[in-house]
Amino acid sequence: MADDDTERSVEIERIGLHKFRATNKRGGTLTFGDGGDADFSPVDLLLTAIAGCTALDIEYITGKRADPLAFQVRPRADKIRDDDGNHLTNIVLRLGVEFPASEAGDAAREVLPSAVQRSHDRLCTVSRTVELGTPVTVELD
């Protein structure tokens, strides 16, 4: 059993045909579905998790220097089916970050490349988990 300081979990329940609600330990909720409507699909959520984790890492590092004027992350991937089954390939995050024309903005721009690299190589739990290929176990109650 995992230690409470390291365990991460959510509860997911079915709320309708192809609709589910995830609830985290802090009480936050989100709904998702199969992608047949505007709700996020599990693949959308995975791309959001990868991009969101990276965005937060970069914001923590650069934000100590300057608040960005603009900050967008656009994740994309190709969904394929091959001998390994359905999976994503060619996952790419496109970052658009703009800082003010000031000393603080210059400092943030200066650390931006290393912040991106640090997030990718060490900090982002989500992309690190995907890249390392952590096994997933499914158990029936």
Image (spheres, rainbow, N blue to C red):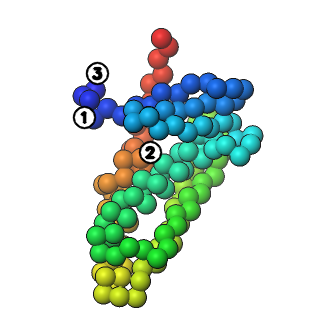
Residue 107 versus residue 76 in the image, above or below: below
Q: Is residue 2 above or below residue 133?
A: above
Closer to the camera in the image, 50 or 70: 70
Q: Do residues under tags 1 and 2 come within 8 Å of each other at their CB atoms?
A: no
The image quarter in which residue 122 lies: bottom left
Give the labeled residue for mark 1.
5
How far is disc 1 from disc 2 in space, using C-alphas? 21 Å
Q: Amino acid at mark 1?
A: Asp
Q: Are marks 3 and 2 in contact (CB under 8 Å)?
A: no
Q: Position of residue 100 (x, y in %)?
A: 41, 83
Point out which mark residue 1 bears.
3
Label 3 close to label 1 by CB (< 8 Å): no
Residue plotted at (48% across, 11% down):
141
Q: Is residue 94 left or right of residue 127?
A: right
* Residue under pointer 2: 130
How far across and down, in percent of the image, does residue 130 sit? 44, 45
Which one is nearer the viewer's eye here, 24 or 42? 24
Write down the quadrant of residue 85 in the picture. Answer: top right
Residue at horizontal 52 percent and vertical 63 percent from the top: 73
Q: How many badges with numbers are in the image?
A: 3
101 lies above or below 41:
below
Element type at mark 3: loop
Question: Which type of secondary structure does the marked residue at label 2 adopt?
Answer: helix
Which mark is nearer the camera, 1 or 2? 1
Tag 2 or tag 1, which sits nearer the N-term? 1
Mark 3 to mark 1: distance in Å? 12 Å
Front: mark 3 or 2 = 3
> Which type of secondary structure does the marked residue at label 1 adopt?
loop
The three-letter code of the residue at mark 2 reads: Val
